[in-house]
Amino acid sequence: MNGKTNSHSAAKEGEPVSRDQLDFEPTGLEIRNLTITYQTENGPLDTVRDVSLDIAPGEIYGLVGESGSGKTTLARAVVRYLADNGHVKRGSVLLDGIDLLRMGRSEMRRVWGSRITMVHQDPFRSVNPAMTVGDQIAEMARIHMGMNRAESRKRAVDMLSWVRMSDPATVARRYAHQLSGGQLQRVLIAIALTTNPHLLIMDEPTTALDVTTEAVILDLVRDLLSEYQTAVLYITHNLGVVARLCDRVGVIYAGEMMEQGPVQKVFKQMLHPYTLGLLGSVPRVDVKKRDIVLNTIPGYIPQPDSLPSGCVFAPRCLGAEQECRRARPPLVEAIEQSGHWTACRRWQALRESSRDFAQSQGKREYREPTTEEIVLDARRVKKYFPVSRVRLWDLLRGRRPLVRAVDDISIRISQGFTMGIVGESGCGKTTFARCIAGLEKATAGEILLQQRRLHPSVSRRPVEQLKKIQMVFQNPDASLNPQVSVGDCVARPLALLGHLSRRQIQERVEQLFEAVNLPRDYIDRLPHELSGGEKQRVAIARAFATNPALMICDEPISSLDVSVQASLMNTLMQLQDTKGTSYLFISHDLAAVRHLSNWIAVIYLGRLWEIGSAVDVFRPPQHPYTEALLSALPIPDPDARQNRIRLHGDVPSSVNIPSGCRFHPRCPRKIGPVCEQEEPPWHDDGHYHRICCHIPLQQLAEMQAGEGR
Amino acid sequence: MVIYLLRRIGFILLTLFLASIIIFAATQLLPGDVAQVMLGKFATEQALANLREELGLDRPAYVQYFEWLGRFVTGDWGNSMVSRQPVRPLVAARLRNSAMLAVVALVFYVPLGILFGVIAALNREKPLDQIIAGFSMAFVGLPEFVTGLLLISAFAFGLAVLPANSSIAPGTSFLKAFPSLILPAITVSLTGLGYITRMTRASTIDVLNTEYARAADLKGLPRRRVLSRHVLRNSLLPTVTVIAMGIGYLIGGLIIAESVFGYPGLGRLIVYGIQRRDVILVQACSMVVVMAYSLSNLIADILYSILNPRIRYR
């Protein structure tokens, strides 16, 4: 095995590495019956069991699973980079017919980077902060392709332009902190493709990115890889990404393969209840809103030390039979020669019943509330921050630049309604929510709660008003005191803000736990004894303790697995139905916002661009920004037709806000100088649907309808 | 970066100003009367009053302070109250000695500390790591007079290769002084060695666990390159700060080690000045020590900003 024989010849112009450099034909990756064991305090645990999969050269294989399913462990085992206490117990990993598991450490080091490369999840943490990104690409060329310093530098710039980085020569001299997440992810892809590897492993490469950036990166991966003969193992939890990008898909659960096959076949006809459950728990923008109940998968993923004796999914499977719990079903090819495999012994029954996936989601009787009482009326709210890092130049000119995080946003929420706020990260949606909660003092504007003016600062608001606005944050670990039992945590606002006896508080806590579907015996537990979803339920229970009129949910489900997200969304809706609370729901996940919201506000660079009912915002005429956000969203259906509208570049800084329409530098529908010079007018489409754009609504609708959705 | 450095320099000037106030106030609080000490027990009231007036001791404290500060800044550090000689040459000579000792100690313990720290980090939780941890703990904990005396008995009396007494004459050249510097340098190094080892170990382990260090491994780079370019480049940043703190300590804080070896450094000069109520001398020495601390911190800040692109490109 010699990974370096392909190193010394020069590459052709334009294409980083020509294919004739390969020492022999790549035959792809074959994983056979792989079982991975970790040594733990409780003895050895098999975390991945008997997994087999093949990836042909040029094929993108999506490996889907929730956290704890073993997908990252599998990838680590393939590259022989397991933690010290892990090892492969059985099986083989063949790359181009050679068993990687038989290789020594130093041989593997030559395979790494030349035959196998990886793109990691978090671009911000995967790039060395003390080295220019150009050098980090160049060192691949120097080590693996024997280039000298000058050649490798040039190669780095070539690779950057290959991944469509604008101004590659400048970017090559930059450090990680000077680049955006999307740019850094391009750098990582450039690093990974420099040596024309036979296997590329991408581990959740777009999870940390905005949906608009994700779309651009997914397009890039798809386009670039069509020119390579690289086998790609793409790990993700997002079925939408799989549908958009992958050729084949494998669904892994509790360390075992549940279903596997070509994307077209699997998405059309799911033959495993787990896959069905996963898909059913994802809200979709292209399926009817709000009046479906999302599927949830009851229970939890089993730990490797307490696996059921039968099918690993049986304890959570609604259709499990006696036989399912008795013996572990093998992975079988459902229809001969179809390449579609399932580990469910009831797949034939599933095939009959699951024709339409929407049927698997329950219907919900939902009527919009009829009251017209305005709960929240935020008028022309602004929040400016002084810039934290002052530049000498500004200082000398006596300027103190401002970050205009929220720049004139007005919204109203009626009682019992949900207002969803969407926008890319850095658009000001969280700052806006914090202004309403009083956690940031708004620079200007008025905030009225039930017709009463709120003081900008939370510390100056009377207790009665504090009770009426509650907030749920993204990270429950940070918002729950680790030393205090979750019951006390929920009891605290009751004790502080109400006049209740000890017994009454206890009763209320029990009621609240019941309302958020937490078992009563959880009351005395500490936060670390709960899962992420359960902790978020505690946070919700705490927020509801004071019977708020307005709940601000700032990305409350974003850090959770999809099936957990679904059950939390169901809980939030249920609570709204019974208590009539209004929600301000902030998320970058458009599908979740659409699912939960009656009204949606679209924010970009601190300003509102479109506001309307969830139905109206999601269909033409739309603001071009809304249109781009929607078009970027990966839909878990390989046949979904979406216009390919992409936003290039990054959100400009809120210090130097573009003139005219703030969106013009990135607007795919820009009509001319008017966009750069004049602030766009508001158009009213009726039903309180309003759009702020220079393009007349009629014209927008025609453009957008013409391209067909 | 310019702003960053200007801010650091401004901060240091402020530190020096505050330190000068504290030093002046502290020396005013020294028990005893300078005039009395200088003239002896049997001086007449008139003689004491004359001397106080001559020294300016009868004026308000803030006037004395600003006069002293003004003279100090312009280089006139005053005459010793005991010997009536200018203190500046005396302090300068001692500073030179202290600096020589500091250089030898730094050259000895910084590379060694980094080396041990990295070795410990690479063998984390293994016997080698535990041995290094044990030694560095012992080094930090052992008092200098114990290690100093042990070294003297081993190398000066036992092997008889190095001098036991390091009391070098003023103006001795570095090369000539070198043999006398070795034992005190090793003695004062041990504490710093322990600190640097543990600091380097901790930060290297942190960096080894980062995504980018793993990514560098999986790029198939040679292990040595992963360590030098990707790991140490980042993990030595906190160590730079620890080294700077060490320099200040080496210049002014070596009272015990200097006494054990009879080495004429700044630390002993301060003790001498305090014992004789020589306010002028103590003030001058203290200011020099504060300046040494500040300067080494400034150098550390500059070095840090050069090594850390997040500060360099701001």
Image: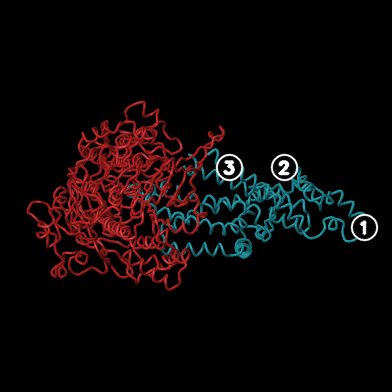
Q: From mark 1 to mark 2, how far is it between C-alphas?
A: 35 Å
Compared across the picture, whether A397 is left or right of A370 comes to right
Of residues B290 and A681, the one drawn nearer to the viewer in this rendering: A681
- Identify by letter the chain in red: A
Of residues A12 and A704, the one drawn nearer to the viewer in this rendering: A704
- How many other residues sit within 10 Å of disc 3, few (<14), some (14-19) or many (≥20)? few
Q: Which residue is mark 3?
A: B7
Which percent across, then down, holds residue A115? 25, 46
- Placement of A684 over or under B109, stated as above or below: above
What chain does mark 3 sit on? Answer: B
Amino acid bearing label 2 = Val
Which percent across, then down, holds residue A438? 47, 51
Compared across the picture, whether A118 is left or right of A349 comes to right
Q: Are marks 3 and 2 in contact (CB under 8 Å)?
A: no
Q: Secondary structure at mark 3?
A: helix
Q: From mark 3 to mark 2, how far is it between C-alphas?
A: 21 Å
